[in-house]
Image (tube, rainbow, N blue to C red):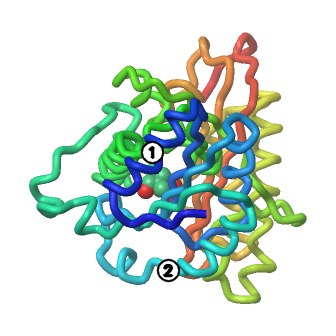
Amino acid sequence: MLVIESPQQLREAIKQFKQQGKAICFTPTMGNLHQGHLELVKQGQKVAPISVVSIFVNPMQFNNADDLKNYPKTLDADCQALEAQGVDIVFTPSSDVIYPNGLAVQTYVEVPVLSDCLEGELRPGHFRGMSTIVNKLFNLVQPDYACFGEKDFQQLAIVKQMVIDMAMPIEIIPVATVRETSGLAMSSRNNKLSEGDKRKAPLLAKVMNQLAIDTQNNTTQHSLLIRDACHVLEAGGFDTDAIHIVDVLTLQAVTPETKQAVVLMAAFLGSTRLIDNKVVSICTNKDFTL
Ligand code: PAF
């Protein structure tokens, strides 16, 4: 496995694989890898013989300087896990290499509408930073495929739209969320939970699954379903941040035309914000109420 820091060396290595006619699958990460990241890599390896992973904690997508500073860095362990997984190249650029002139003058890529709602409303500039770095990494790696987790549902929707809008010759591969046996979605953030909070955490997925069933049955108004879900979470020790039921394609409110909706959950356990989501087919031909 090659561990490469410089874009020039990366381009050289990629050029050689391309000359051999080998397809490339790319998985961008910010490191601190867990089973969920490795699953992205594995799914990529099913579609392309060459696997490239980037590890770059992207300052442009952080709203909070402390979050950026405290972001866990586990490069040695990450590289070991990626090598064991048969990855061909790990790209680990520094911030100076990616943003040589600083963030203030960096050209950016922004997917409108999809970036402005939901998480985008809570974290202004986050998705602009994310789509800018993904665009730049795509230009450097020039992959045929790229894997993104369904756990970050809005991120995946934005990347898919960016690839379409910018006519990028890249197929985006959505990868299902990897869960603990308890149902808890895997996340680097789970490591921050206290032992007590770890026991409480699986409730988020349980409440989400029930909410998804209720949404599917469309038995009552979505706002009432969300209110009940908040109560259950709060009784279980969570502080609910946001629960939304939106159209999967537009990420806007469900309409009579909506065929699939996504239940999006965000709730705090202590200071750790956990997210999860579930897609449901909905039947809006009954009494349609929100
Ligand atoms: O999902 C992440 O880890 C990041 O948003 C990504 C896609 C690596 C871009 O920095």
Q: Where is residue 76 in the image (x, y as percent from the top left)?
A: 58, 81
Name the amino acid type tagged 2: Lys
Indicate if the residue with disc 2 has its beta carbon within 8 Å of ligand 1: no
Kindly identify which residue carries mark 1: 118
| Residue 80 visible, this angle | yes
Neighbour class for label 2 at 10 Å: few (<14), some, many (≥20)? some
Pick the residue in front: 287 or 199.
199
The image shows residue 131 at horizontal and vertical percentages of 36, 44
CB atoms of marks 2 and 1 within 8 Å: no
Q: Which residue is drawn at 56% across and 40% down?
A: 146
2 or 1: mark nearer the eye: 2
* Residue at image coords 75%, 25%: 281
Q: Quadrant of residue 49?
A: top right
Q: Position of residue 96 (x, y in %)?
A: 23, 68
Amino acid type at circle 1 is Leu
Residue 118 percent across, percent down from the top left:
45, 45
Q: Camera-side residue: 97 or 246?
A: 97
149 and 81: which one is in front?
81
Q: Relative to 92, does residue 244 appear above or below in the rendering?
A: above
Q: In this view, does 207 lie above or below 221?
A: below
Which residue is tagged 2? Answer: 73
Residue at x-position 41% and y-position 41%:
138
